[in-house]
Image (cartoon, rainbow, N blue to C red):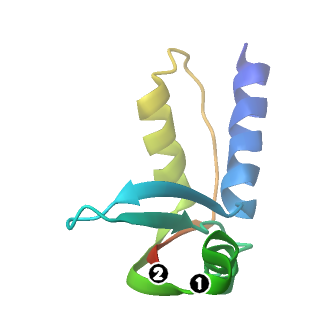
Amino acid sequence: MARVSLTFISLTSIALLAGCVSFKEIYLADGSKGYNVNCSGSGMNYSHCLEKAGEICSTRGYQILNQQGEVVSLTNAVREFEARTKINTVSHTFQSGAVATRNLFIKCKQ
């Protein structure tokens, strides 16, 4: 069981570090549709978010509404993940490094 937990944590850590660009449709305060583009991970940067924004809105273009980002230590990110999944095993995991979180909020032009 400990080996499975260690493997799971290791794979999760790699996924957090590598990251991938994703987006979620959201509704803005005025009722219009917008997008939250997430390009978190140490292998990503805001240019990846901008590229995805271009794919989403295509030739219409887009307006950047907000940009958020921070660097979170890997230990804190794993601790938060474990708290949300409520793993009931006793184990000791040692990580180092950081996880960068980045979000870009956009609205496609008409």
Q: Say few, some or many: other residues with alpha carbon within 10 Å of mark 2 (under 14 / 14 to 19 / 20 or more).
A: few
Q: Amino acid at mark 2?
A: Gln
Eyeballing the image, is 109 above or below 7? Answer: below
Assess whether mark 2 and mark 1 are in contact (beta carbons under 8 angstroms). Answer: yes
Quarter residue 68 falls in: bottom left
Residue on which disc 1 sits: 60
**Residue 76 placed where, x, y %?**
46, 53
**First reached walking from the N terminus: tag 1 or tag 2:** 1
Q: Secondary structure under badge 1?
A: helix
Q: Say few, some or many: other residues with alpha carbon within 10 Å of mark 1 (under 14 / 14 to 19 / 20 or more).
A: few
**Residue 11 placed where, x, y %?**
77, 41
Residue on which disc 2 sits: 110
Q: Report the Cα–Cα distance between label 1 and label 2.
A: 6 Å
**Residue 42 placed where, x, y %?**
68, 72
Q: Amino acid at mark 1?
A: Arg
**Residue 93 placed where, x, y %?**
63, 39
Q: Residue at x 43, y 85 (%)?
A: 64
**Left or right: 69 as drawn, with respect to 18:** left
Q: Residue at x 67, y 64 (%)?
A: 21
Q: Secondary structure under badge 2?
A: loop
Q: Residue at x 54, y 45 (%)?
A: 78
